Amino acid sequence: MNFISASLRSPARVAHLARSYPRRTFTSTSAVLSGHNKWSKIKDKKAKEDKARGSLYTKAVRDIVVAVRTGGSTDPLLNVALANVLKRAKQDAIPKSTIENALAKAGGGKEGAANITMTFEAIAHGSVGIIIETLTNNKNRTAGDIMSILKDHGSARSGKVDFMFERKGVIRATIDSNPAEEEQLGALVEAALEKEAEDFDSNKAGENEPTEVELVCAPEALSRVTQTVLGRECVSLISSELAWRPKEAVELGDEIESSISELVDELEEHEDTMRVWTTLG
């Protein structure tokens, strides 16, 4: 037997070592999988970006359809509102195929030969009127989908509400930020009133931001008022369309308004929806 090995293993030696070197305690913790956590964040970010991109595509299609239906032509040379919508779509990098399909759907071409307009009315939280305008080639599918969205929301149901609204022409434009901006706004509003505009509103988000202008008129004056916007220095047409405007806008609590906003978002995400209007202020 090796003397050194034996002496180290003797009971007395082991006891001495135990007294001289207390036993260490060990703890264990769950390892943080930083790689997995980072990947989850990337996936969440991508999902949000994809949803935003999808909403952008949906809005572009909707705007194209509305511009064609309002302007009466799929030719941007003959339809200024459509020309502006197509310009924005290209700036937003909307795929060419998406634009072409939207034009076909709106114009009743190969992709949209059977398309018809359907309007749905609903009431939410007992007092908020909602009008949903759709363009579809399958009435039963669209009706079923819209009713399902209203039912799933819980606080909304189908109901007659058109008496809460009035049909109006709405023109939206911007005036570039410049030293003569106020004079240009005044001249635009004066010219629009001469063409039977009934009301207007303007908003400027910041000192160097453009002034946003909204002109409201009777449906039969829409074309005339729209023409007052075109060709003016520093003025750009954003949209020109027929809309449902509330006769009396209602204001409710934040919780209810948030609930209505979620419902409107869900309705607008449907591929057949063109526009959604409510009586909320």
Image (cartoon, rainbow, N blue to C red):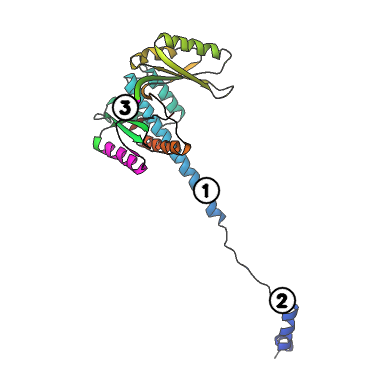
Residue 162: which disc? 3
Residue type at mark 1 is: Lys
Dominant secondary structure (helix, strand or loop) of the stretch shown in magenta = helix
Residue 41: which disc? 1
Whether residue 169 is situated above or below residue 129 in the rendered picture? above
Location of residue 230 (image quadrant):
top left
Whether residue 95 is situated above or below residue 168 in the rendered picture? below
Residue type at mark 2 is: Pro
C-alpha span from label 3 to label 2: 85 Å
Tell how many labels.
3
Q: Which residues are magenta?
A: 141-164
Q: Is residue 251 visible?
A: yes
Location of residue 87 (image quadrant):
top left
Along the viewing direction, whichever of 119 and 251 lies nearer the viewer: 251
Residue type at mark 3 is: Asp
Judged left or right of residue 84, residue 203 is right
Along the viewing direction, whichever of 70 and 3 lies nearer the viewer: 70
Indicate whether residue 1 is drawn in magenta: no
Q: Is residue 97 visible?
A: no
C-alpha span from label 3 to label 1: 45 Å
Whether residue 272 is situated above or below residue 8 in the rendered picture? above
Whether residue 79 is situated above or below residue 278 in the rendered picture? above
C-alpha span from label 1 to label 2: 45 Å
Q: Please name the residue that numbered disc 2 is placed on.
A: 22
Query: Considering the numbered disc 1 on the image, is that residue within a helix, a strand or a loop?
Result: helix
- Quadrant housing the C terminus: top left
Callouts 3 and 2 close, C-beta under 8 Å:
no
Foreground tag (3 vs 2): 3
Q: Sort mark 3 into few (<14), some (14-19) or many (20+) by Cα contacts within 10 Å.
A: some
Spot occupied by residue 174 in the image (x, y as percentages of width and height):
49, 19
Location of residue 72 (image quadrant):
top left
- Which is more N-terminal, label 2 or label 3? 2
